[in-house]
Image (cartoon, helix red, strand yellow):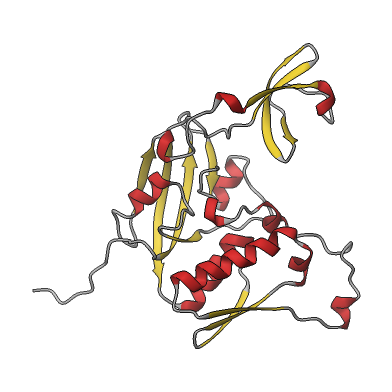
């Protein structure tokens, strides 16, 4: 009988680090944690993070079909999962295609152009007369998608869990100190000028308290004279945090509502 170390199948509540590349039915890559792949498929963001994401299993931080597949495997597994629309980004909703008058657009509409109307991003699919039809469905809606992915590892260390989750929520690996069951998170100055951080920090703390043995999360803001000389106008909101959607409906992998 072997006394070696046995891997365990991934389960709910596990913090895992996963690397992945998502593809549409026609092979189009729409998301990836691989920097070279991002460059090759015109997805590269110079301010983005590459190398993998830390997620919590069972918290709706990834699409249902991918999570189901992950839970059948162990750390170190590398493979592919083909996921139907109902377990991916949902079926395409015809009611999300809207005909809008030209006056709603900041510039002349053209087919294929992405626009933001009332806080929602859509794609112009038709221009006819004085109206343009905008599809507010995601490009992934109604499609069977494939994820090539690898479960890099299961995190056990409290600090690694906290830092990894901060990166998922903000796009930045925040400086975290662990003292017993208290996490002290050092907040970058520029986050104080981010409206999204106000809600993000609460959800991040809630996940850490609910899914780890932490009993308290402290956010620490540090100022000195040099920092105080900078005004809100001089400090830009961090791009990744600005784009980040709260992980209860998010993650780079999550389906949109």
- Which one is in front, 253 or 50? 253
Residue at position x 47%, y 78% from top? 158
Where, by quadrant of the figure, is residue 81 drawn?
A: top left
Q: Residue at x 70, y 64 (%)?
A: 198
Furthest residue in direction left, as rendered: 1
- Image location (x, y in percent) of residue 139: 57, 33
On screen, residue 47 versus residue 248, left or right, reads: right
Instruction: Locate the C terminus and report the quarter of the image it occupies.
Output: top right
Q: Quadrant of residue 106?
A: top right
Residue 40, placed above or below residue 124: below
Viewer-nearest residue: 93 or 179: 93
140 over 237 or under it: above or below: above
Picture coordinates of residue 23, whole percent (x, y): 48, 38
Judge left or right: residue 41 versus residue 155.
right
Can residue 33 be seen here? The reply is no
Residue at 64% x, 55% y: name it: 48
Q: Position of residue 92 (x, y in %)?
A: 52, 28
- Viewport quadrant of the N terminus: bottom left
Question: Picture coordinates of residue 176 (x, y %)?
Answer: 59, 78
């Amino acid at each position: 009988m072997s006394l070696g170390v046995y891997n365990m199948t991934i389960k709910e509540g596990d913090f895992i680090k996963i690397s992945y590349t998502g593809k549409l039915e026609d092979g189009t890559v729409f998301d990836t944690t691989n920097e070279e792949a991002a460059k090759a498929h015109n997805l590269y963001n110079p301010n983005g993070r590459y190398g993998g994401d830390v997620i919590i299993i069972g918290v709706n931080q990834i699409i249902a079909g991918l999570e189901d597949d992950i839970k059948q495997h162990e750390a170190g597994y590398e493979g592919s999962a083909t996921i139907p629309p109902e377990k991916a980004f949902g079926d395409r909703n015809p009611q999300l295609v809207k005909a809008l008058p030209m006056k709603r657009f900041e510039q002349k509409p053209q087919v294929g152009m992405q626009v933001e109307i009332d806080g929602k991003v859509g794609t112009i699919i038709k221009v006819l007369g004085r109206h343009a039809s905008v599809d507010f469905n995601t490009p992934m809606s109604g499609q069977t998608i494939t994820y090539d992915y690898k479960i890099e590892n299961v995190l056990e260390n409290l600090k690694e869990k906290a830092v990894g989750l901060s990166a998922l929520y903000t796009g930045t690996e925040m400086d975290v100190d662990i003292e017993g069951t208290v996490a002290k998170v050092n907040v970058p100055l520029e986050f104080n000028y981010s409206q999204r951080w106000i809600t993000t920090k609460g959800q991040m703390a809630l996940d850490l308290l609910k899914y780890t043995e932490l009993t308290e999360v402290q956010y620490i803001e540090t100022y000195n004279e040099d920092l105080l000389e900078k005004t809100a106008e001089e400090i830009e909101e961090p791009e990744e945090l600005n784009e980040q959607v709260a992980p209860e409906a998010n993650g780079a992998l999550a389906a949109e509502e």
